[in-house]
Image: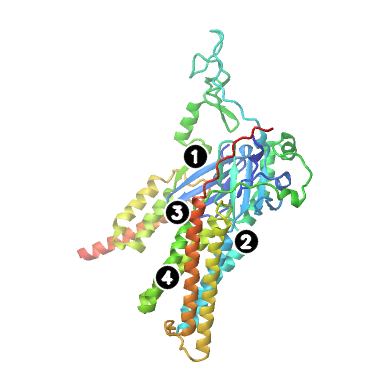
Amino acid sequence: MNHAAIACLRCRASLPPTAVNTTAPVVCPACGVMTLTAVFPALFRPQAAPSAGEPLATEEEASCFYHPRKKAATACELCGRFLCALCDVDFNGRHLCPGCIERGAKKEERPTLDNHRTLYDGVALALADLPVFLCLFATFITAPMAIYVAVRYWNAPGSLVRRAQKPRFVLAILLSVAQLVVWAAIVARSLH
Amino acid sequence: MTTHPRNYKRLAGTRGGIHSLWLADDHLLLLSHHWFSEEYRRFFFRDIQQISVAKTHGAMILNIVLGLFILLLAGAIPLVEVWQGLGVWIALAALLGVFNLLKGPSCVCELRTAVQTVRLKPLRRLRRAQKVLTRLRPLIEAAQGGPATSELITSGRIAPQAPAPAAATATVQRPLRHCHGRAHLILFWLCLADLPLTAVAYFNDQGWMDALGLAHFFASVGFAIAALVQQQHSDLPSSLKRIPILVLVSDGFFLVTGIGYTVFLISAGRLQPGQNIAWQSDPFMLAMTAVSTSFIVACGLAGLVLRKKSRFPPAAPPPAPPSDQP
């Protein structure tokens, strides 16, 4: 690491120690802009060199499940498979194998792997209420679509941070049912 | 660690906004909202190396623009018969300005880990960023086993030294950013375009010429502000950096003078509210237009020449041959 690693965000000039880890913003001596810089011990932690795993010394040694010619360093905490240093993934303090992580990501079993969520409650609600304002005749199609989305994705994981998913589904269903009732009344009246 | 939705606490950004920042037990969550989906980025406390905040001029520029807008509308009030419409716009702009002032100065914020540096877009105000940092610092330090102060000094990244006097710290060399000066170029050509526009308007007094002139004025002001922002900490010569300031000052001066003269004519009964001044036949306005156009065109010409010189500096003299004497 070089001396200029802790730099002002605006001018990229290196900051003096007095300008680092302050509680209030201080003026950068180089550019005169108010800056607030907090550094933490992780900045000084030496980076672990990537290990490719040790080769087996004797045939009796335990080997990696994925690399039979490499020595096992640890076991996966989920599936128990032996792993070499290359396959051992430090996942939030736990030793896991790449296979378990991939399966967890696919099945959405591990929320910390989720980096994308589709908001089906928003889709259902938009299908239920937007056509009312934009194109009233489209509700004939969008109301059943909204009901389908709400029922189909009732148990789908919603937003990680918002809580009110089910009430939005219920609201979408109610609005859509009301629209369909109105359509049914119009059709019945025109038939009679 | 599994984090249930109710364990996330909002740190910055609005609930329905595009970007927001959330706090969990052991990590920060940066949320980007795209219509019907959300993207998440997690930053675990034990991986965060640095969080930097720097004040920007965004809030100040917005206030200047709003102030100019209010000034322009206020100047137009004597010219119209129904002023209530303008009053609503002035009130809205003033409200926005007050809201902007209350939120405080703007800033940029970056978070750094071993493998990435991420701009924290929800933290756009200095005051909010400071509050968030005050809240995060003990959590991150607890996750990493204490503050970094002693490590900072012993690691040699920042040499240990006593608090330096202002004169000593001011000698730190800051790197200059290279600037192409595209906003400057557009501004200079807009300045030159003032001459034909004024000439056409002199001989052809039509309504659309007024609209074109107004558009030209706003474009000049906009590009002058853009040039001012671009030229900060840049390698452009200082003479070139002065021209956008001159253009802005002259535009502001002639605008205020014009408004003042119009108000004077109305109060003197020489002009009816809602009636435009025929500047082609008014000696004062004609003289002022001639002076302003000449000044702006001179600024444009000087800017183009200076920009060309700065882009193609004169060739350096050949190095002297090494002398034989020690």
Q: Position of residue B3 (x, y in %)?
A: 57, 41
On the same chain, marks 2 and 1? The answer is no
Label 3: chain letter: A
Mark 2 = which residue? B104
Camera-side residue: A154 or B38? Answer: B38
- Residue at 50% across, 88% down: B266
Q: Position of residue B235 (x, y in %)?
A: 56, 51
- Residue at 24% across, 62% down: A187
Q: Nearer the viewer, mark 3 or mark 1?
A: 1
On the same chain, marks 3 and 2? The answer is no
Mark drawn on residue B195 = 4
Whole-angstrom CA distance, mark 3 to mark 2, is 36 Å
Secondary structure under the numbered disc 4 in the rendered image = helix
The quadrant in which the C terminus of chain A is found is bottom left
Q: Nearer the viewer, mark 4 or mark 2?
A: 4
Q: Nearer the viewer, mark 1 or mark 4?
A: 4
Secondary structure under the numbered disc 1 in the rendered image = loop
Res B167 seen here = yes
